[in-house]
Image: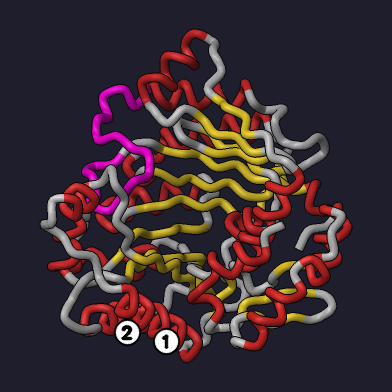
Amino acid sequence: MQSGSHLRMSGIYIHIPFCKQACHYCDFHFSTHTGYQEQMLEAMRHELVQRSAYLPAGSNVQTVYFGGGTPSLLSPTSIETLLDTIYRHFPMDLKELTLEANPDDLSKEKLQAYRSMGIDRLSIGIQSFQEPILRFYNRAHTAEESYRVLDTARDGGFQKLSIDLMYGFPAPDHTHWRLDLETALKMDPGHISSYCLTVEPKTALGRWSKAGKFLPAEEEFVAEQFEMLQNAMETAGYIQYEISNFGREGMFAVHNTNYWKGIPYLGIGPSAHSFDGINRGHNIANNGQYLKAMASGEQVFELDVLSLQDRANEYILTALRTIWGVDLHHFEKTYGLNLPKERLKEIRWMKEHGWLAASDKFLRLTKNGKLLADSIAEKLFI
């Protein structure tokens, strides 16, 4: 999964910490107060300049990804000023420029502006095509906007499209999920990211769950929906190249694939994470503190030093989630351990259960093993 040539690639992630409203399940860092938006953008431009030497020497930026929050909430001019700063201060060999967007933000005028500044991929947060579910999630867009958005994006010149879908909504049966899958595949975006609805403590769902006002779906129900997802995608010709990501050939997300392959990236903005190829780090996850620190010249970035064991286990956890699996030669060369020898019993046991496929070169999860990805990875940790 990793070779010396990868060190010549890198990526930049820009975290836009603003949203119109708070989705009831979301625990990403954002604020619905946008009065200081210009101040924030200026601070982020300054951080780009300040940290322009973070990425490994000699590496070219291959991907730029605007995430959040809701990047499509910003004006195209604001996005363009951030891009201009990147182009001025980083060596570029751009292969993919992604912007996360909500359906209600994508007007023809915005799409035209995005295309003119070089954005070539949209990741659209649909989550569901069912109006009652969207209202329960407190999404800002409607089901009608979900249905229209891909046609609007294609009319605007975008061919590289991805949509987000969420499964695990508690319901009497799988009718809603089956309809969402059928609708998504009929629209055929080329790439679909699908995540399970989870209850995070600091969200509205978390508070409702604690108060007994919300009961999450049973594990078996959620597992059935994951299997429905896998089967529907496989039938439609989509490849599950990562546990939560499905794409047609040639439509895999380059930026996210580079994450999983251990390629360095720089994260800009409040709460953004970075990886220099050896160690990780994260920015202050507070808009006010981030602005104050940037204004006073203080450090917004906190380094997370990883031991060799940390790095090895992180590689196992991440690589197993992908279609490429754990490269055993790379593992031994990088971490000095022969994983099949170290975990002989565990690997044999998981192969017998049909969860793991193993060869002399790779360890990969089977289709059934993908239901148990995290627990399987833990059994392989060194």
Circle 1 residue:
232
- 346 left or right of 182 in image: right
Residue appearing at x 57%, y 62% in the figure: 253
Residue appearing at x 36%, y 20% in the figure: 288
At label 1, counting other C-alpha atoms closer than 10 Å, the crowd grade (few under 14, some 14-19, many 20 or more) is: some
Query: Which residue is nearer to you in this view: 111 or 346?
Result: 346
Residue 140 visible, this angle: no
Marks 1 and 2 in Cβ contact (< 8 Å): yes
Query: Which residue is nearer to you in this view: 292 or 48?
Result: 292
Instruction: Check if residue 8 falls in the magenta segment.
Output: no
Which amino acid is tagged 2? Glu
Circle 2 residue:
182
| Quadrant holding the C terminus | bottom right
Q: CA distance from mark 1 to mark 2?
A: 8 Å
359 above or below 71? below
At label 2, counting other C-alpha atoms closer than 10 Å, the crowd grade (few under 14, some 14-19, many 20 or more) is: few
Instruction: Check if residue 32 falls in the magenta segment.
Output: yes
Say which of marks 1 and 2 sits in front.
1
Characterize the magenta stretch by its predominant secondary structure: loop
| Quadrant holding the N terminus | bottom right
Which amino acid is tagged 1? Ala
The magenta segment: 19-38
Residue 154: x %, y % from top left: 41, 67
Residue 307: x %, y % from top left: 72, 41
